[in-house]
Image (spheres, helix red, strand yellow):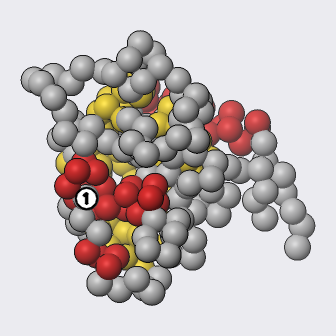
Amino acid sequence: MRKISFGMWTLGIFFLVVSIMAAAGLASVSSSRNGEAAPKGGQAINWLDSADISWYENNKTAANFTLSTPEELAGLALLVCSGDENGRHDFAGCVVCLSGDIDLGGKEWTPIGINTSTYFNGTFDGRGHVVSGLGVVTRYKFDTQSWGTGYYGLFGYAGSKASVKNLVVRGNVVASGDRFAATGGIIGAVNGSNQT
């Protein structure tokens, strides 16, 4: 088996694709470098506050999971960011699918995967569905490692074995806080240095 090294070339192509998507109106990316972004109409509620992980708790050994609500999608973010009773969970070897469109309603979002040691590493298949209403994206509240190196998007950081496919994301991504490394509509950053 031949090892292929991806580096800045892959990241360049990735950011080119995100730029094309933004130009086509499929994603919009911006940032707030001077503190928390102020949501319209008052205090935003972070989806983590209503995260539903019952889809995982009901069958932790499953290889396939299906999500149908914003609360379940937030549950995926919570599990990747904080893990379960056995520790961190990157969903390596698992397939997570959407059963329909999901509207995040512009509420504050914490990314699925947040840094180079806490990331999503499974397969996420949107099945052609749309995640809309992505707005203010904030760091995971208990993340101390990524200060200054935060990754923002629906997915913040994806590992080298991760696959995100068949997904459309709509919204205006606003990275809250004053320090971050990468912002994207779908994925903030991908570890692509050791693909085989």
Decide if residue 16 is on the left or right side of residue 109.
right
Towards the viewer: 74 or 164:
74
Decide if residue 144 is on the left or right side of residue 116.
left
Decide if residue 58 is on the left or right side of residue 61.
left
Determine crowd level at label 1: few under 14, some 14-19, many 20+ residues with C-alpha closer than 10 A: some
Report x, y in % for residue 189: 59, 41
Residue at the spot of label 1: 51
Is residue 120 in view from this perspective? yes
Residue under the image location 44 percent in, 58 percent down: 82
User: Which quadrant does the N terminus fall into?
Assistant: bottom right
Q: Is residue 158 above or below residue 58?
A: above
Q: Is residue 56 above or below residue 70?
A: below
Report x, y in % for residue 75: 31, 61
Callout 1: SS: loop
Towards the viewer: 124 or 41:
41
Report x, y in % for residue 7: 78, 42
Q: Amino acid at mark 1?
A: Ala
